[in-house]
Amino acid sequence: MDYENILVDREPPIAIITFNRPKVLNALNQAVMDELNAAIGELNADPTIGAIILTGAGQKAFVAGADISQFNELTSMSEAAEFARRGQAVLDRIERLSKPVIAAINGYALGGGCELAMACDIRVAADTARLGQPEINLGIIPGYGGTQRLPRLVGRGMAKYLVLSGEHISAEEARRIGLVEFVVPAAELMEFTRALARKLAAKPPIALRLAKRAINEGLEGNLARGLVYEADQFGTVFETEDRVEGINAFLEKRKPVWKGR
Ligand code: COA
């Protein structure tokens, strides 16, 4: 598929999706969301790709939010709710994708940009990045999952501070509160993130998928349900050839060769 608003670079075993509307700081409109959804589906189905990176074009922004110019087109409550649901579905798909997705936050990650980063499995930020949920300053609230994923990452109080104040925070502050996992010098962002993506892509794919799913499931329900789910997945992963290979390779002091079976 040809894309107009994003770039998709395949560098097997990883792929990079770049939001490419730098004139509006890579703001998300419906076309971007549709292309993102299509690209995610394509890469998930591509057996040569084991991990995906999301980043933004230019030096200034990862994604500066939903495209504010489209908000006045939402004329009814139901249209606005539908807008939120459509965006949430794409971010949900990223969170549940069978391959790891890493956000390389190269600049502003505000509103929908911060929400998108939070739907990724791991976040790496350039030391120049700024993050926040500034919707309150537009008289609205986060609609792409921010009110739900932010407290799960940073806790209730800090989530409320960020959503209710609309303040942006630095990459280092974001790391301190658990909103991003790594902060690196801006010039090293892509090199660091590529290395991380390659590291994950080299892991046994079934175990990777089940571990990701077990963590997601556990956070969605209560602890007891999460533990039951984890034990089930632990059972499933033991059925794989990769489990036999991984354990034998360790005992035989050699590198495992994963088959994805
Ligand atoms: N939607 C649409 N356009 C956006 C945008 C968004 N979310 N964020 C930035 N832009 C546009 C600006 O309107 C500007 O366009 P112009 O050159 O035609 O005037 C261009 O991108 C550059 O942004 P600008 O505001 O001039 O850059 P800045 O360095 O002064 O400020 C920000 C950067 C990120 C602080 C500021 O752009 C901003 O606050 N953006 C909105 C963030 C937001 O509220 N996001 C949540 C939306 S729900």
Image: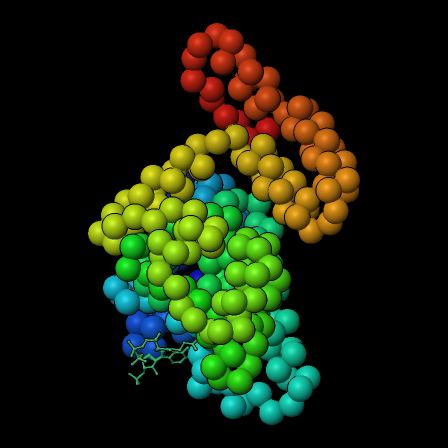
Residue 166, image x, y percentages:
47, 73
Is the N terminus in the top left, top right, bottom left or bottom right quadrant?
bottom left
The residue lying toward the viewer, choosing from 213 and 148, is: 148
Q: Is residue 205 left or right of residue 223?
A: left
Residue 3, image x, y percentages:
40, 67
The residue lying toward the viewer, choosing from 151 and 85, is: 151
The residue lying at 25 percent from left, 64 percent from top is 59
- Residue 233 in the image: above or below residue 131: above
Q: Is residue 53 visible?
A: no
- Residue 52 in the image: above or below residue 145: above
Residue extending farthest to the left is: 187
Image quadrant, ligand 1 = bottom left
The residue lying toward the viewer, choosing from 39 and 154, is: 154
The residue lying toward the viewer, choosing from 23 and 12, is: 23
Residue 118, image x, y percentages:
51, 57
The residue lying at 25 percent from left, 54 percent from top is 186
Q: Is residue 54 left or right of residue 213?
A: left
Is the C terminus in the top left, top right, bottom left or bottom right quadrant?
top right
Q: Is residue 205 visible?
A: yes
When asked about the image quadrant of residue 92, the answer is bottom right
Q: Please name the colour scheme applied to the rendered image.
A: rainbow
Residue 188, image x, y percentages:
25, 48
